[in-house]
Image (spheres, helix red, strand yellow):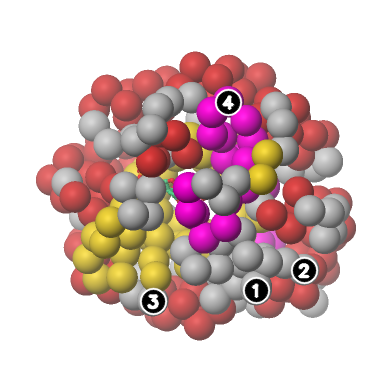
Amino acid sequence: MTTDTRLELLPAVDVRDGQAVRLVKGESGSETSYGDPLAAALAWQEDGAEWIHLVDLDAAFGTGSNRELLAEVVGRLDVKVELSGGIRDDESLRAALATGCTRVNLGTAALEDPEWTRAAIAEHGDRIAVGLDVRGTTLAGRGWTREGGELFETLARLDADGCARYVVTDVNKDGTLAGPNLQLLRDVCAATKAPVVASGGVSSLDDLRAIASLVPEGVEGAIVGKALYAGAFTLPEALAAVRAVAGR
Ligand SMILES: O=C(O)c1ccccc1N[C@@H]1O[C@H](COP(=O)(O)O)[C@@H](O)[C@H]1O
């Protein structure tokens, strides 16, 4: 359970083939391109972001790597970075942490390699978060192309291993502007004491207010992607909206 009352916002910069993109439901080929990832991240920082959620989609899909570019982006930012995509072994974890990012998200590795994940959590503590990317309550890995077990069984195992934080994505909502899956967030918060970062579906300030209302249940942050890029609201408007909920 988080003690801070204000929802953290994490604008997303997902990188494919060197470009900032948004996908729909994580489907390869559904990309809309938004140009230079560094420019996008610096723009969110300029607009008041405290975090950037930075994803190497090629590494997540197994179609390549944007490692050097992402390291440069992290190095040029003054804000906290949550880095993910393709962090699956000692070498990729070491490289990710060496960028100076605040924390990394493990996805596929947490589903396929429990022993390695346990050791990574034991060694790096809250610099490790686990991304729980689900369709229904079935986890998805390898670019969301492969099923990876049942959400609540995996959550119980990761909790027992001391996982500090979960990033919960409803894959069917991601990039759709269809609204967040609030019941999923409530259910995950009820099952763990660790803070939860919400991801997928945010379309409006009301969606952010609804997620912010779950802070007392354990939601700590929300990743915002498509809505910001599409101009549904600005980041300053979003920050003001979640501050207002916290001040009630
Ligand atoms: O963010 C996306 O749109 C996305 C789409 C498809 C696959 C992964 C995606 N994002 C994030 O990538 C990591 C998982 O990477 P890995 O499995 O550890 O290589 C995770 O944070 C996803 O949310």
Residue mark closest to the camera, 4 vs 1 = 4
The mark nearer the N terminus, 4 or 2, is 4
- Residues at badges 4 and 3 in contact (C-beta under 8 Å)? no
Q: Residues within 10 Å of mark 4 (few under 14, many from 20)?
A: some
The magenta-colored residue range is 3-28
User: In this image, 224 relative to 152: left or right?
Assistant: right
Q: Which residue is mark 3?
A: 136
Q: Which residue is mark 1?
A: 179
Give the CA distance from mark 4 to mark 2: 28 Å
User: In this image, 162 relative to 104: left or right?
Assistant: left
Q: Residue at x 31, y 47 (%)?
A: 142
Q: Is 227 placed above or below 63 here?
A: below
Look at the numbered disc 1 and give the secondary structure of its residue.
Answer: loop
User: Is residue 10 part of the magenta span, yes or no?
Assistant: yes
Q: Which residue is mark 4?
A: 18
Mark 2: amino acid = Ser
Look at the numbered disc 3 and give the secondary structure of its residue.
Answer: loop
Q: Residue 113: x percent and y percent?
A: 17, 46
On the image, which quarter does residue 24 sit in?
bottom right
The mark nearer the N terminus, 4 or 1, is 4
User: In this image, 137 relative to 222: left or right?
Assistant: left
Q: Is mark 3 within 8 Å of ligand 1?
A: no
- Residues at badges 1 and 2 in contact (C-beta under 8 Å)? yes
Q: Is mark 1 within 8 Å of ligand 1?
A: no
